[in-house]
């Protein structure tokens, strides 16, 4: 019941905003997002105190095609829902004080997006998952198309086609699994797991690649990433935040829930390949980030590198890898939203994101520079920031899986420090120039976004145990499936 | 059967309305009449009664398709008010021709005898030829009517010859008797029987505008008045598909290997060719014409996978497709009216000119492209599930590739609507058209949320 409320409350709020077309749309949206956060806090409380049957709902929807409305939350889902409901208020708040056309449509679409994201993370029915997965694409597409920057028509369309192609492959895989479920066909997660396990080895390999393509495009993992830098730079800031902060976690979550448990033989066979291309992606994206001249593109590439590490950790099929992925998803969400917001602030004042034109901002805007330092440290995984816990666990897991790949993955920390510190130098230190001389420091609403995010980065870095505790039982259950196999290895 | 009487009666009433100068209320009368016809049909669902010495059988198949045809016609009347008002001299003729087309379409879903099939097709086609040319002073409209007439007559000729040959081999026009004969004598059927089957296939492929028998469709669709095009690509398509499905699933499913290969090639071409060509169109009306040909490919894919049990998926696909098409044409009509053209440039900035039209068209195009959670997605999904269940994975992948091409050309329009600068001042729409678009959008969602009932009809 609570989960259903979590899904449909943002939708109701969005419809209200669409209908009212009020000039206070932003306030209504923020209120709704905060209310949603409170609902998710209640869900966490229920989860902790053993009221988890309150989180479950299961109704038959379309019997003929085996579709049911089945939602539930385990620790993994809960953390991602929390990430979504926690970030959306900041994303909405970050738009305050910026002017754009048709605000009611804009805020409505953000809330529709939130509905779809929560739906993706809680669906326990394969087809329902697919529906939410696709629905999430529509609002973000229009957010980028209507409020995006130059050349957005072509770029957003490329993004759309890439993800649509990936998801159609996933649809084939899901239908194939559905037709192999034992007894009365159904899309229930457990039934699909059973169907996947019963498939022959070549079939499992095929299903693995179909599903992997869909998730890899979304994350994006090298070489499926070509849509991402352009889309991130052309999207409006809030769109970029949604894409990088939450939407790419859909791909990672997809791997955890709808790939690893579905085709075990396929995952074991192709796991090394997946880790390998993820690690290639890490180094490739980091190297490109080093030579970027544009702030926003640089963060886009750094995001590919971070996600590559998470993907590599997932396919090690170890507790460290999966737990590292969970905490790194949270951390990356917070860091990247903070980072894109700093870019937005810089762009708001100087109308440029080219690093060559910036410099000396620290002299005139110390508060912004301080917030930037904290977010940056989270990004380069300094100990006692949230980034450290995740990256440490992930690199550790990759190292145990394969030593040389572990070493290569470890480069991400060094390369990350190189491009992030360089960015800081070029934008914040040095002498002020004509563009940055009149830079005004953070306003109240900008502080309200950046300070809590910075605080969270440190809090999680110092005391990550509560987060790890939420996902631990779910991760352990997931890996039970593999325990006989990993024991042999 | 009563529904058919009512529809024919309405057609005659429309003709007589000229005498009583009752034009003003005619559209309303037609809509009420059709609603009554639907109302008398619904309680009959679940029964099966034969009429005229077994020449017409009203069963669930025929009633479901008839109800769909009539419902879409009601929506069409609502949409096409301008078409009638534009030429008051021919108001009544047009209304009666539409009603006779509907009657023909209902016969094509209810026949139990090849003669009735032929009758239905002719009633439908003759009215349509006239409607296609109903904009008398337009060269394109005349060309469309003439082309349609020539090509349609050819197709009917093929069909008739096919029916004759099949009659020669099975000594019957009754489709059940033909089916029994085919099963009993499957080893001793003469060669000309198979020629007959293929000729029927070709004749009906013309009617459903499957590639390579589609050449008339784009010209006729883009030449005819836009309202008539909307009618052709929805109501007429439903009737043609119903006839096709009935003939081949009842009569010839036992000898499926002899025609399924040909049909498979037709299907592959129907998926690939129109979708490719549509991507190159700059005129939205023509693009919709090609896309409507392309949608037949998905229907054929479901049919090939399971000739006998795919009816419910095909029916659902047609429902989803018709609602989305009518919506797209409703918006197209408004844009055509305000900017006297249907090129993509005329859609530029529609979101700023009239958000409701833009959002309505967006949702319709997304449904046609098969994006969840809209009805079009479930239609495609049902097709894919049937195809994969029968091992047609490579064909499913082809269908997915063509869906992506579909997304490409539908999105060209969407991008133009949101991204480009407006092509004119704000566009005002009458309250009834606004209401229509809201209802159609609601229908697209409702079909997606509650398809259970429709799927359970068969």
Image (cartoon, helix red, strand yellow):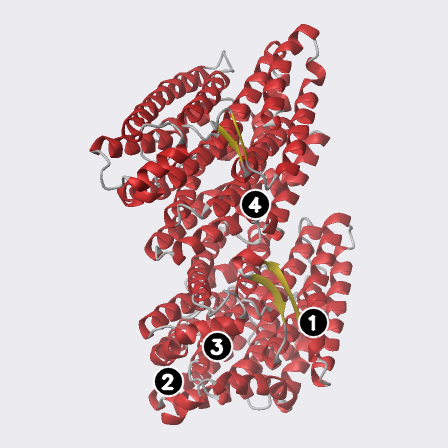
Q: Work out how far the residue at label 4 is from the one at label 2, CA to CA, in angstroms.
A: 60 Å
Residue B457's tag is 4
Q: Chain of mark 3?
A: A
Give the class, few, some or many, for how many residues have Cα within 10 Å of label 4's Cα (few <14, many ≥20).
some
The answer to whether tags 4 and 2 share a subunit is: no
Residue A311's tag is none
Q: Work out how far the residue at label 1 is from the one at label 4, CA to CA, in angstroms.
A: 55 Å
Residue A449's tag is 1
Image coordinates for residue B74, horizontal then vertical, percent: 63, 30
Q: Nearer the viewer, residue A308 or B299?
A: B299
Q: Work out how far the residue at label 3 is from the one at label 4, CA to CA, in angstroms.
A: 52 Å
Q: Which numbered disc flags the more N-terminal residue, 3 or 2? A: 3
Image coordinates for residue B152, horizontal then vertical, percent: 38, 22
Q: Which residue is mark 2?
A: A408
Q: Quadrant of residue A329?
A: bottom right
Residue at the spot 67% in from the left edge and 6% down from the top edge: B19
Q: Work out how far the residue at label 3 is from the one at label 2, CA to CA, in angstroms.
A: 13 Å
Image coordinates for residue B238, horizontal then vertical, percent: 49, 34
Up the image or down, A429 lies above or below A294; here it is below
Q: Label 3's element? A: helix
Up the image or down, B200 lies above or below A408; here it is above
Q: Label 2's element? A: helix
> Quick check: can you spot residue A81?
yes
Q: Chain of mark 4?
A: B
Q: Which numbered disc flags the more N-terminal residue, 3 or 1? A: 3
Labels 2 and 1 touching (C-beta < 8 A): no
Q: Residue furthest top?
A: B19
The answer to whether tags 2 and 1 share a subunit is: yes
Q: Work out how far the residue at label 2 is from the one at label 1, CA to CA, in angstroms.
A: 35 Å
Q: Is residue B208 left or right of residue B364?
A: left
Q: Chain of mark 1?
A: A
């Amino acid at each position: 019941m609570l989960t259903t409320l979590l899904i449909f409350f943002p939708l109701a709020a969005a419809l209200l905003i669409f209908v009212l077309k009020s000039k206070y749309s932003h306030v209504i949206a923020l209120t709704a997002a905060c209310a949603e956060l409170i609902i998710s806090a209640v869900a966490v409380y229920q989860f902790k105190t053993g009221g988890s049957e309150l989180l479950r709902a299961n109704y038959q929807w379309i019997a003929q095609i085996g579709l049911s409305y089945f939602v539930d939350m385990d620790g993994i889902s809960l953390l991602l829902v929390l990430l979504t409901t926690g970030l959306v208020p900041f994303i909405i708040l970050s738009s305050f004080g910026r002017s754009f056309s048709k605000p009611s449509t804009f805020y409505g679409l953000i809330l529709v997006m939130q509905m779809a994201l929560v739906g993706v993370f809680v669906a326990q029915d394969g087809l329902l998952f697919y529906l939410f997965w696709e629905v999430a694409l529509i609002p973000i597409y229009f957010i980028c198309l209507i409020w995006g920057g130059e050349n957005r028509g072509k770029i957003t369309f490329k993004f759309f086609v890439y993800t649509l192609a990936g998801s159609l492959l996933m649809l084939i895989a899901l239908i194939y699994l559905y037709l192999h479920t034992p007894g009365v066909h159904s899309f229930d997660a457990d039934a699909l797991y059973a169907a996947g396990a019963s498939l022959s080895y070549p079939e499992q390999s095929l299903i693995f690649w179909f599903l992997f393509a869909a998730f890899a495009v979304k994350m994006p993992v090298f070489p499926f990433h070509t849509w991402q830098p352009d889309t991130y730079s052309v999207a409006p800031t809030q769109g970029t935040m949604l894409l990088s902060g939450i939407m790419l976690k859909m791909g990672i979550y997809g791997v955890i829930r709808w790939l690893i448990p579905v085709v075990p033989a396929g995952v074991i066979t192709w796991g090394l390949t997946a880790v390998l291309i993820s690690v290639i992606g890490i180094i490739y994206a980091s190297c490109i980030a080093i030579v970027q001249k544009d702030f926003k593109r640089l963060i886009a590439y750094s995001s590919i590198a971070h996600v590559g590490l998470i993907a590599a950790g997932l396919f090690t099929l170890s507790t460290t890898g999966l737990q590292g992925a969970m905490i790194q998803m949270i951390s990356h969400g917070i860091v990247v939203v903070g980072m894109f917001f700093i870019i937005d602030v810089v762009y708001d004042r100087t109308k440029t994101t080219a690093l060559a034109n910036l410099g000396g901002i620290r002299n005139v805007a110390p508060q912004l520079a301080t917030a930037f330092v904290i977010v940056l440290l989270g990004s380069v995984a300094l100990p006692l920031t949230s980034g450290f816990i995740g990256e440490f666990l992930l690199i550790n897991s990759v190292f145990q899986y394969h030593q040389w790949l572990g070493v290569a993955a470890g480069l991400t920390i060094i390369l990350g420090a190189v491009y992030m510190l360089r960015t800081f130098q070029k934008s914040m230190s040095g002498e002020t120039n004509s563009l940055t001389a009149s830079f005004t420091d953070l306003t109240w609403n900008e502080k309200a976004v950046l300070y809590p995010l910075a605080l969270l980065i440190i809090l999680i870095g110092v005391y990550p145990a509560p987060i790890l505790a939420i996902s631990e039982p779910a991760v352990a259950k997931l890996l039970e499936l593999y325990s006989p196999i990993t024991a042999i290895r | 059967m009563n529904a058919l009487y009512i529809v024919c009666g309405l057609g005659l009433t429309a003709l007589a309305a000229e005498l009583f100068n009752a034009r003003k209320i005619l559209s309303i009368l037609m809509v009420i009449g059709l609603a009554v016809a639907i109302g008398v049909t619904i309680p009959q669902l679940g029964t099966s009664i034969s009429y005229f010495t077994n020449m017409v059988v009203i069963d669930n198949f025929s009633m479901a398709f008839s109800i769909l045809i009539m419902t879409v016609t009601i929506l069409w009347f609502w949409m096409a008010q301008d078409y009638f008002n534009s030429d008051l001299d021919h108001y009544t003729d047009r209304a009666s021709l539409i009603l006779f087309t509907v009657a023909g379409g209902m016969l094509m879903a209810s026949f139990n005898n090849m003669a009735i099939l032929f009758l239905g097709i002719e009633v439908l086609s003759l009215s349509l030829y006239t409607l296609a040319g109903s904009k008398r002073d337009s060269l394109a409209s005349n060309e469309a009517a003439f082309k349609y007439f020539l090509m349609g007559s050819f197709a009917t000729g093929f069909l008739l010859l096919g029916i004759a040959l099949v009659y020669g081999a099975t000594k019957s026009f009754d489709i059940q008797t033909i089916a029994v004969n085919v099963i009993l004598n499957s080893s001793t059927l003469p060669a000309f029987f198979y020629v007959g089957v293929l000729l029927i296939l070709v004749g009906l492929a013309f009617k459903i505008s499957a590639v390579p028998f589609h050449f008339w469709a784009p010209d006729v669709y883009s030449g005819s008045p836009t309202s008539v095009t909307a009618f052709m690509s929805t109501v007429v398509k439903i009737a043609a598909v119903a006839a096709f499905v009935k003939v081949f699933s009842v009569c010839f499913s036992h000898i499926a290997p002899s025609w399924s290969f040909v049909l498979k090639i037709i299907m592959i071409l129907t998926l690939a060719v129109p979708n490719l060509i549509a991507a190159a169109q700059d005129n939205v009306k023509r693009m919709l014409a090609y896309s409507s040909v392309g949608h037949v490919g998905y229907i054929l894919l479901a049919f090939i996978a399971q000739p006998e049990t795919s009816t419910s998926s095909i029916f659902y696909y047609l429902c989803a497709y018709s609602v989305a098409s009518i919506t797209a044409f409703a918006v197209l009509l408004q844009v055509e009216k305000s900017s006297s053209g249907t090129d993509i440039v005329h859609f530029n900035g529609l979101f700023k000119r009239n958000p409701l039209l833009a959002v309505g068209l967006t949702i319709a195009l997304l449904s046609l492209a098969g994006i969840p959670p809209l009805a079009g997605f479930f239609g495609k999904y049902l097709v894919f599930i049937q195809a994969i269940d029968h091992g047609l994975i490579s064909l499913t992948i082809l269908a997915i590739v063509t869906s992506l091409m579909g997304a490409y050309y539908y999105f060209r329009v969407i991008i133009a609507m949101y991204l480009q600068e407006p092509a004119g001042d704000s566009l005002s729409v009458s309250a009834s058209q606004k209401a229509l678009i809201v209802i159609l959008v609601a229908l697209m969602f409702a079909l997606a949320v509650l398809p259970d009932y429709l799927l359970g009809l068969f």
